[in-house]
Image: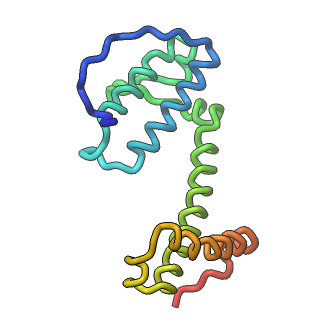
C-alpha cells in the first residue's frame, strides 16, 4: 500500500476506551518511527506524518493533554519527555534495535559465508532450498557465538 495514495475513503468514526487510545497512540508512534524515523525530510511519508499529528491532536480528548503538547514554533504536536519515559516507547525502540542488530549481523555473516563457500557461479545456479540448507549451519554458528560472547571475539583484519 502506498502511504501517500490520495484515494478518497469514506470517513469512519471509531470509539476507543482510554486504554485502547493509549495503546493506539503508542502503536502509531512506533509505526511512524519505523517508517519515517530514518528518512530525511524529502523522503518521508507525508501521510504518516499527517496521521501521527491527527492522532496526537486527539490526545486531549482522552485526558492526555499533559503528554502530547502543541509546539507553536514548530506548528506540530509533540510528546513530552515525561510521556516518552512513562509510555516506555524508548525502551521498546531500544529492545527492537538491539534484536534487529543481532539478527541482521547473524544474517549478513551467514550470507557472506555461504557466498564464499559456494562461489558466485554456484550461488547463482543454486535453488533457494539449497541455499537455505547451506546457510542454516552458518546461522546456528553465529547465533551461538553471539549469544555466548556478544561482539567480544569480532576482529577486523
Quarter of the image where one finds residue 125: bottom left
Q: Position of residue 43 (x, y in %)?
A: 27, 46
Q: Is residue 25 above or below residue 64?
A: below
Total labels drawn: 0
Residue at x-position 65% and y-position 75%: 137
Which quadrant would the N terminus be assigned to in this image?
Answer: top left
Please state if 59 lies on the left or on the right of 5 as rendered: right
Residue projecting furthest to the right: 148
Residue at x-position 41% and y-position 22%: 70
Q: Position of residue 69 (x, y in %)?
A: 47, 23
Residue at x-position 59% and y-position 30%: 83
Residue 73: in sight, yes or no? no
Please state if 29 lies on the left or on the right of 36 as rendered: right
Q: Position of residue 37 (x, y in %)?
A: 42, 45
Please state if 144 lies on the left or on the right of 94 as rendered: right
Q: Is residue 57 above or below residue 127?
A: above
Residue projecting furthest to the bottom: 157
- Nearer the observer, 91 or 117: 117
Indicate the colouring scheme: rainbow
Q: Position of residue 7 (x, y in %)?
A: 24, 23
Residue at x-position 58% and y-position 35%: 84
Q: Is residue 88 above or below residue 94?
A: above
- Nearer the observer, 73 or 64: 64
Residue 36: in sight, yes or no? yes
- Nearer the observer, 55 or 113: 113
Amino acid at each position: 500500500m502506498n502511504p501517500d495514495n490520495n484515494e478518497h475513503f469514506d470517513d469512519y468514526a471509531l470509539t476507543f476506551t482510554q486504554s485502547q487510545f493509549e495503546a493506539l497512540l503508542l502503536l502509531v508512534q512506533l509505526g511512524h518511527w519505523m517508517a519515517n524515523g530514518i528518512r530525511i525530510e524529502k523522503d518521508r511519508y507525508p501521510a504518516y506524518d499527517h496521521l501521527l499529528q491527527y492522532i496526537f491532536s486527539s490526545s486531549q480528548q482522552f485526558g492526555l493533554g499533559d503528554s502530547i503538547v502543541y509546539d507553536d514554533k514548530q506548528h506540530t504536536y509533540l510528546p513530552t519527555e515525561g510521556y516518552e519515559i512513562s509510555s516506555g516507547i524508548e525502551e521498546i525502540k531500544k529492545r527492537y534495535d538491539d534484536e534487529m542488530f543481532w539478527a541482521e549481523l547473524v544474517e549478513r555473516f551467514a550470507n557472506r559465508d555461504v557466498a564464499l563457500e559456494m562461489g558466485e557461479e554456484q550461488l547463482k545456479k543454486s535453488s533457494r532450498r539449497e541455499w537455505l540448507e547451506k546457510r542454516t549451519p552458518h546461522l546456528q554458528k553465529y547465533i551461538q557465538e553471539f549469544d555466548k560472547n556478544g561482539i567480544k571475539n569480532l576482529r577486523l583484519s
